[in-house]
Image (tube, rainbow, N blue to C red):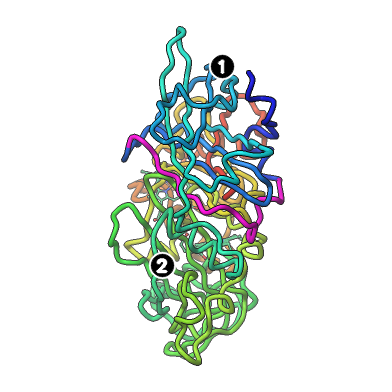
Amino acid sequence: MPSFKRITIIYMLLHILSGCKWLNDGVERIRIKAVVEPKNSKTAFLKLKAYTKYQSIQINYINTGNDLKPNDSIEIRMGTNLSTFCNEMELVWSGEVKDPQRLNLRIEKEQGYLTSKKPVKACLIRTLNNKQIVVSSTIATDEDPAAPIPEAAAIYNYGRVCQEAISKIPTMNCFDGQLMPILLEGKEVRNLAPNADCDNPVEIEMPFGQCVPGSRVLVLPKTDPDVDVVLICRKYEVRPMDSPIFDDISIIQHRRSTGATCFFQMPYRKTNGTRIPSPTEAPKDTPKGAITAQDFWMTPTAAAGRECITCHDSDPFIHNPWIGQHKQLPSQPQGKYVILGAAFADWPESQSVTTTTPNNCTQCHRIGSMKTCDTMGESVGRTKSANLLPNHFKFPEAYWMPPNHNAGSLTEWKAKFEQDFLALEKCCMDDKAPGCIRSNLSENRGW
Ligand code: HEC
Ligand code: HEC
């Protein structure tokens, strides 16, 4: 392998890469754009990232089509002559597939592609019975709309990565969202004492309890059927219903086909929620007197510090009786879940927990190994949610899983579902218990 002389392979596999701080925002990079070929291919996904600062090229491959198997022999070939056939390009790496789901290589070169500023073509080639098959190829040019702009705010650069992979987030207004009623014995209440109980508390701890009315949820109308964007504007304190002040505003943005997901979080503070700047709004585009994106949003690093994944662990969007009042809340319970952003590369990756024998509770959706495992008892009357009215902690109200279960009595519900729930709970608590399966659920892209 002659080309090895000029090349050092530093890391393989995302798990190792994800801990590396050199992926942080603000790193100067050659602007690149990765093109997947064949176009519209759903089966292969090879991407190139080039970093001038580190003189390195990162190659990332997601094996969505299962066209790689463990121990397959593969080669990465590269060159700046785009019309050269893949198998005639310079060999930069060859080896065997370890993790068939993904491949991450960081290739360091002392000279060559990175300084040329020419487009670079990379090919992933699989050798099978001495025959070479091009699995995926990609071209990096200098036109990447998501390439970080060194002088821009970190939130802006993160927003652009998300915009490129998912969609453009518009400027939004909390009042375009639906009010999520707080119910007391079935009736909507607009003024409850701090820490009072209700029929449908939210499931996050708030300083004045979990039954504060006035929060709103906006599910963006679909312009692209593949994209889901949800804005939540929470109130932590009781205020008049028309008060524009909210305490906690965040967005989850998701593309179904690729699983790409982004998280935006405002720091906790009293904020007028009538104009929520798009993370990619440039300061010059913010109207006079309005808050800029940089001032409105936490930096990606700070938002990542909240570890959204620990609660949003089964899929990007959490469902419960409170937020379920929004009938258009997206759900894609078995979909791909890929976390974008260098700042989010260190997140723990969630796993899907189930039993080896068919289990009712994981028939329609996954159960994530983190918070969902801890709190799923709330869906089946075993753990009382904080601030749930005590007389609602009974059958049938506190047994909201499975939906519309039609069990006429607790005895009937138990006969149908209790064993499955208990088996699952056991697997949640002990991942080595017999009869349990865990599989990878979320995945950090790292950039
Ligand atoms: C402690 C657990 C927890 C953490 C951490 C968390 N969330 Fe959530 N989130 C929830 C719950 C629970 C809901 C459902 C509504 C409710 O009960 O409050 C929710 C709902 C949402 C929603 C509405 C869409 C949906 O999933 O139902 C958005 C948007 C959201 N969270 C954004 C974020 C972002 C961004 C972060 C990280 C910066 C984050 N969340 C971290 C618990 C959490
Ligand atoms: C028939 C399909 C179905 C079955 C069976 C089912 N669920 Fe669900 N589950 C759902 C749906 C749909 C939602 C979303 C609910 C909503 O939008 O209000 C959900 C949501 C949940 C959630 C909230 C997860 C989150 O974070 O978004 C939990 C926890 C849960 N289910 C647990 C269970 C348990 C435990 C069982 C077994 C007793 C079960 N489910 C069986 C359909 C099902």
Query: Which residue is more in the foreground, 155 or 398?
Result: 155
Q: Whole-Å distance between the Cαs marked 2 and 1?
A: 41 Å
- Is residue 296 visible in the rendered image? The answer is yes
In the drawing, does residue 73 fall left or right of residue 86? right
Tell me the chief SS of the magenta region: loop
Q: Position of residue 106 (x, y in %)?
A: 63, 37
Q: Quadrant of residue 193?
A: bottom right
Task: Please provide the residue range marked out in magenta.
Answer: 20-38
Secondary structure state at the residue bearing disc 1 = loop
Query: Which residue is more in the foreground, 352 or 86?
Result: 86
Q: Is residue 34 magenta?
A: yes
Residue placed at 32% from the left, 62% from the top? 328
Residue placed at 52% from the left, 53% from the top? 381
Residue placed at 67% from the left, 35% from the top? 430
Residue linked to disc 2:
169
In the drawing, does residue 351 fall left or right of residue 191? right
Residue 71 is marked as 1
Q: Residues within 10 Å of mark 1 (few under 14, many from 20)?
A: few
